[in-house]
Image (cartoon, rainbow, N blue to C red):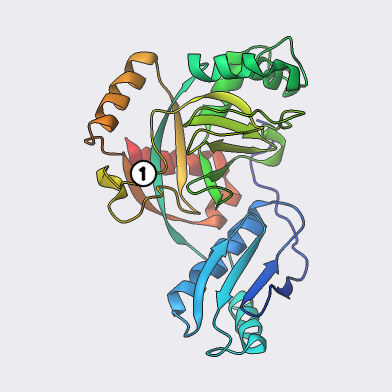
Amino acid sequence: MTESRIRRVDLPEPQYGFGGDDHVFVELDRQMSFDANFQAMAVTQQIRERDLDGVIEVCPANASYLVRFDPDVIPPATMIETLREIAESTDIEEYQWEARIIDFPVLYQDPWTHETQMQFRDRHQDPDSTDLEYCAKINGYDTVEALIDAHAGEPHMVTMIGFVPGLAWCHQMVPRAAQLEAPKYEQPRTDTPARAMGFGGAFTTPYPVQGAGGYQLFGRTPLEVLDIEQALPDFAESMVLPNPGDIFDFRQIDRDEYDQIRDEIEAGVYEYTIETVEFSPEAFFASPYEYNRSLTEALD
């Protein structure tokens, strides 16, 4: 633990640009930071709360956001002027939002992603090691177990949804010096099991479906993050589980618990463990480790 606070970042002036006649793209920074991401979430939450006539869709991202609007209802120049006003009136040091804390079991070093990564070692930076061994080495951990403890030791915030339905970018809620980092494969795989826990850059992404991928493979979760049939109770309102601003508490489990959860999910009876709290960026910046403990205690 090298820092006890989150180092704040001075954001540049937001860059507002049009995408066709009916989209505004707002770039908050060229780099991902908690400041940029929290600003994107706070502004887009305020846009939704104001329920502005002509605004059709709002999409926050890691350090930017996109607004789709009807130019016949709200002129483009007025749209940008409104976004500037919302941004200027939103101070994340005083802002809070309702966040969901979600218990997220993970079977690290599972047999399915291990088999997959062994099939594609010729595309990896270190063909003679596993993905976890490689990531432990480049992040300064002596053992895979120490890397897993670090990955599961602090919660991860969902900072963005996209690329494929249900795919969540999850950024660990620790100071930058404690962030795990790893490159993607040198050449992407043509196959990745559904529910694989991928890691690339400084982001964990539970793969919603089977498909190609390039992230390092850490394990597999028994949970679904995408339920197209909406058969599970927690998907009654949306086929996608994660939302930006959600907090995933990754928890290491064994094979027996993995199988038990899968049985309940396939029977359509599994209920996710989810609690709701008020998230304060300022409290998190000031004392992230202590604040994380207070957040995850809501799941006890």
Q: Where is residue 234 in the image (x, y as percent from the top left)?
A: 29, 46
Q: In this view, which residue lies farthest toward the front? A: 190
**Residue 38 shown left or right of residue 104 in the figure:** right
* Number of marks in picture: 1
Query: In terms of depth relative to the viewer, which is nearer, 186 or 103?
Result: 186
Inspect the image, locate mark 1, and give the three-letter code of the amino acid beneath it.
Answer: Asp
**Residue 226 shown left or right of residue 287 in the figure:** left
Q: Position of residue 60 (x, y in %)?
A: 57, 61
Q: Residue at x 49, y 13 (%)?
A: 111
Q: Residue at x 70, y 11 (%)?
A: 129
Task: Quadrant for residue 226, please give it.
Answer: top left
**Residue topped by disc 1:** 227
Query: In terms of depth relative to the viewer, which is nearer, 270 or 10?
Result: 270
**SS class, disc 1:** loop
Q: Inspect this view and state whether residue 90 appears.
A: no
Rendered-image quadrant of the N terminus: top right
Q: Which residue is drawn at 47% across and 85% down?
A: 53
Task: Quadrant for residue 215, please give it.
Answer: top right
